[in-house]
């Protein structure tokens, strides 16, 4: 057995073009961020979900963090490498990823899943992710927030 791997990303879809500040309740847990996290992410987001930090454009915000809980892997799906594409396409549609999000997710995870004969995959969605280190989003309009993280243990 190997350790777990995860890749959380945050997609933002405002109803109108808007400036947004995104921060974490426990920023000390962050180990890697992209773009760089400086007391939060202060970004401009357009209606199509494009994110701009004043210098560059992004489609999502990315972070890794120290885990505050032990992974039990009592839940999830055993995925055989030959069925990985079909599994991901089906499950990602069910949890609500759009075409672009599914494509990016599969391009990242497929090579990892295909390295093993069988992998245990668990999807950690927004509500559960919020319990560990709450995302704080400051804005003045309503918008859709999607965070996805898949954990894999081989």
Image (spheres, helix red, strand yellow):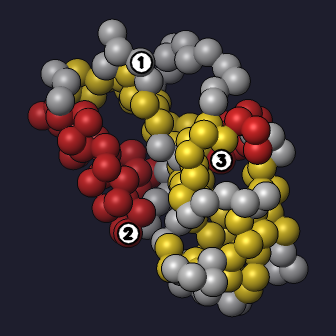
Instruction: Name the N-terminal-most of marks 3 and 1.
Output: 1
10 Å neighbourhood of mark 3: few (<14), some, or many (≥20)?
A: some
- Labels 3 and 1 touching (C-beta < 8 A): no
Q: Which residue is depicted at the point 63% across and 30% down?
A: 66
Say left or right for 15 vs 58. Answer: right
Residue that label 2 marks: 100
Q: Quadrant of residue 124?
A: top right
Question: Is residue 65 depicted above or below 60 in this figure?
Answer: above
Q: Which mark is residue 142?
A: none
At mark 1, the secondary structure is: loop
Of labels 1 and 2, the one closer to you: 1
Looking at the picture, tell me which residue is in the foreground, 59 or 26: 26
Question: Is residue 84 depicted above or below 77 in this figure?
Answer: below
- Labels 1 and 2 touching (C-beta < 8 A): no
Q: Look at the image and tell me in which quarter the C terminus lies.
A: top left
Residue 82: % across, % down: 12, 34
Residue that label 1 marks: 3
Res. 91 in view:
yes
């Amino acid at each position: 057995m190997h350790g777990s791997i995860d890749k959380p990303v945050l997609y933002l879809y405002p109803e109108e073009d808007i400036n947004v500040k995104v921060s974490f309740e426990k920023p000390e847990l962050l180990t890697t961020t992209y773009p760089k996290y400086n007391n939060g992410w202060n970004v401009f987001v357009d209606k199509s979900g494009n994110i701009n930090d004043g210098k560059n454009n992004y489609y999502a915000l990315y972070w890794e963090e120290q885990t505050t809980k032990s992974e039990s892997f009592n839940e999830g799906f055993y995925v055989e490498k030959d069925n990985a594409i079909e599994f991901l396409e089906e499950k990602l549609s069910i949890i609500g990823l759009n075409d672009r999000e599914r494509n990016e997710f599969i391009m990242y995870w497929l090579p990892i899943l295909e390295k093993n004969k069988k992998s245990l995959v668990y999807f950690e969605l927004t509500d559960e992710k919020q319990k560990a280190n709450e995302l704080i989003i400051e804005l003045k309009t309503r918008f859709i927030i999607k965070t996805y993280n898949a954990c894999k243990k081989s």
